[in-house]
Image (cartoon, helix red, strand yellow):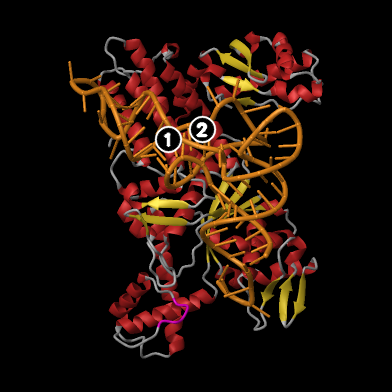
Amino acid sequence: MNILKQTQEKLKEEIGRAVISANLASEEQIPTIILELPKDKAHGDYATNIAMKLAKIAKKPPRKIAEEIIEQFDQTKASITKLEIAGPGFINFFMDNNYLTDLIPTILDQAANYGSSTAGNGQKIQVEFVSANPTGDLHLGHARGAAVGDSLCNVLNFAGYDVSREYYINDAGNQIVNLANSVEARYMQALGKEWEMPEDGYHGKDIINLGQKLVDEYQDQWANKTQAERLAFFREYGLKYELKKLEDDLKQFRVPFDHWFSETSLYDGQKIEPALETIKEKGYIYQQDGATWFRSTDFGDDKDRVLIKQDGTYTYLTPDIAYHKNKLDRGFETLINIWGADHHGYIPRVNAAIQALGYDADTLEVEIIQMVNLLQNGEKVKMSKRTGKAVTLKELMEEVGVDAMRYFFNMRSSDSHLDFDMDLARSQSNENPVFYVQYAHARISTMLKQAEQKGLADGNYDGSLLTAEKEEELLKKLGEFAQVVEEAADKRKPHRITQYIFDLASSLHSFYNAEKVLDDNELERTKARIALMKAVKITLANGLALIGVSAPESM
RNA sequence: GUCCCAGUAGCUCAGUUGGAUAGAGCAACAGCCUUCUAAGCUGUGGGUCGCAGGUUCGAAUCCUGCCUGGGACACCA
C-alpha cells in the first residue's frame, strides 16, 4: 500500500470513529465511507458525503450531522489542517502537504514498479484476443483488438493479476479449406491459367503474393499433380505462411502471446467428445431432425444451438466449447475474450456453454471492441473484407507508426466507435496527442541530463521545498496513479491509463512553463525539483509502457 | 421484429458503487520564445448531457417508454 492510500485509510477510519462517537449510527448501520477528490480545490484535498448518506439513518438534516461529526473529529490523528462543511452537507478536508512530498521517495524507490499493486491477489486470468483466422492479413479492426487486449493484459498484470495471453488459431474448419482453394486459384492464375476464385475465397493481396511465391519456388509442378495432393500441400503451406505473417505483424505491433492455441489440437487430442459428453451427462443435449442440439435456452440464449449437423460435422460452436472447457481445465479463474462487435451475438451461447459445463456465468467475460472507421483526407476509407480491399495492420504501422496506433486505439473506451484519423496520427504536430505525452517525457529527460552535467543530481533534496501550486498539482496527480491502474484493471478499461498520462503530461507542461527547474541561484529548490521531475518521468514511462507506447529521451 | 453498443460544446470524445459550478483535445479568438525543447503555456467564448416521464435531499449516471446511428440475429466461421 502506498503512502497516499495509508493517509486516506487513516482519514476514513477517523471519520467512522467520529460518526460512532457522535451517536449518529451504530457500527452495523454505518455506510461505506467514500472519499472523493474535489474538482475544485477550494473544496479541499478530500471530501466526503457521509453526512448526506446518514440523513436517513440518523433522521437529521445533513448539515447538522456534519457539524456533529466535526465536533467528534480528531484532526491531529489524520493530519488535517482544516475542515469545513459545504454545500448540502459535504465535509471538506484540507491536508498538511507533507503527505504529498513523501510520495517522491516512494516513486524513486519503486521505479519501474511504481503504480503496481497486489489488488488482483494473483488471480489467474486468461485473456484471449485477436484470434483472427489465418486466412489473410490483420486489418484495422484486429489492430484495435490487439492494442486493447495487450494493454489490458499489461494493466491486469501490473495490478497483481496472473495473466496469460492467448491466441486461438482457427486452423480446422471450412475456412482453411477455403484458404487452400484460394491459394490454388492464385497459384494457377500466377501460372497464367484461367482459374476462378472460389465464391467465398479470400481475396486479400497476401494470397496473390503467396500464389506468386509458390510459382517462384515450384514453377508448375503442383499444376500437374492431382487436385487432392495439391490442395493438401497448399493447405499446410498456406497455413504456415499466414501464421508466420500474423506472428511477425503482432510482434512488430508489440503484442506478445504466451500461447498460440491450435483448434486442430482439440481434434488431435480428442478433446471434443469429452466436452460434449460433459454437457450430455448434465442433460443439455438432445437429438432432433437428424442433428445434435445444445439446449442453450436453459441459460438464457434465444434459441437452442446445433452442435453436430445432419452431415455429421461439427458447427463452429462445438470445438469452441471444448476450447473453453480446456481453458477452465487449465485452472483459470476468469476468462476474458476480446471480440469484435460483429461477434456479440455469439456471447449468449458461449456463456450458456460455460454454465452447462458447470461454471458460473461470470467466469467468462466478453469485451466487445467496437468498429473502427478509417479517415483519410477527412473522408471515410471504404473497406470490404470480401474483395480484400482493407487497410492492413502492417500498412498502417508503416504509414503512421506503432506508437501512434497503440496510443490512438487506447485513447477511447472500446465500447464506442472509433474514428481513426490517419492524417492526425501521422502528423508531426501539436495536434497529435501521442507526441504531447512523449514530449513531456523527453522534456524531463533533457532537464535531467543537464542537471547531471551540473552535478546537481546527487540524490539529496528537501521535499518540503515543493510548495508551489503547480508542484502540488503534480504531486497529487502522481499519487493517483496506482488507483488509476487498479481501476483500469478492475473495470477492464485500459483507456483510463491513456487519459491519466495525458493529464499528467498536461500538469507537467503547465508546471514547466510556470516554474524554472534548473536555477543556479536556488540550488536547494533545484534539487527538490529534480527529484520531482524524476518521479514524473518514472510515472509517465510506466503509464506509456502499459499502453505499449515508447518513452523517448529526446524528440 | 428481437437483442447489444452508442447519442454530452461546431468536431472527436472523457465522465459509474447517484454528489458541489458537467470536463479535455481540436477548431475560433486574444496573448507568451535574449531564460531548462513553443511538438509547449496562459486566457476568452462555446452545453435543453437525444426526447419524455419516474425514483430522491440530489440524476449525464438508476428505472420505464420513445427517437436516431451502428452492429448482431445460420445445421457459416
Q: Amino acid at mark 1?
A: Phe
Q: CA gap, disc 1 to disc 2?
A: 16 Å
Residue A200 among those drawn in magenta: yes
**Residue A365, percent across and down?**
63, 52
Give whichever of A156, B7 is nearer the camera: B7
**Residue A327, percent across and down?**
63, 58
Q: Amino acid at mark 2?
A: Gly
Mark with earlier residue (1, 2): 2
**What is the quadrant of residue A541 in the picture?**
top left
Residue A366 among those drawn in magenta: no
Give whichever of A392, B4 is nearer the camera: B4
For label 2, the crowd category at 10 Å Cα-Cα, with few meaning under 14, some 14 to 19 and many 20 or more, is many
Identified at 62% across, 63% down, the residue is: A346
Q: What label sits on residue A502 in the rendered view?
A: 1
Identified at 33% across, 28% down, the residue is: A444
Chain for disc number 1: A
For label 1, the crowd category at 10 Å Cα-Cα, with few meaning under 14, some 14 to 19 and many 20 or more, is many
Chain for disc number 2: A
Give whichever of A233, A306 is nearer the camera: A306
Is residue A227 shown above or below A139? below
Q: What label sits on residue A181 in the rendered view?
A: none
**Residue A493, percent across and down?**
54, 44
Q: What label sits on residue A115 in the rendered view?
A: 2
Would residue A555 be seen by someone viewing this image from the given angle? yes
Is A466 displayed left or right of B72 in the figure?
left
Is A183 displayed left or right of B70 in the figure?
left
Is residue A477 shown above or below A172? above
Q: Main secondary structure of the magenta part?
A: loop
Which span of residues is magenta-colored?
A197-201
Identified at 42% across, 26% down, the residue is: A535
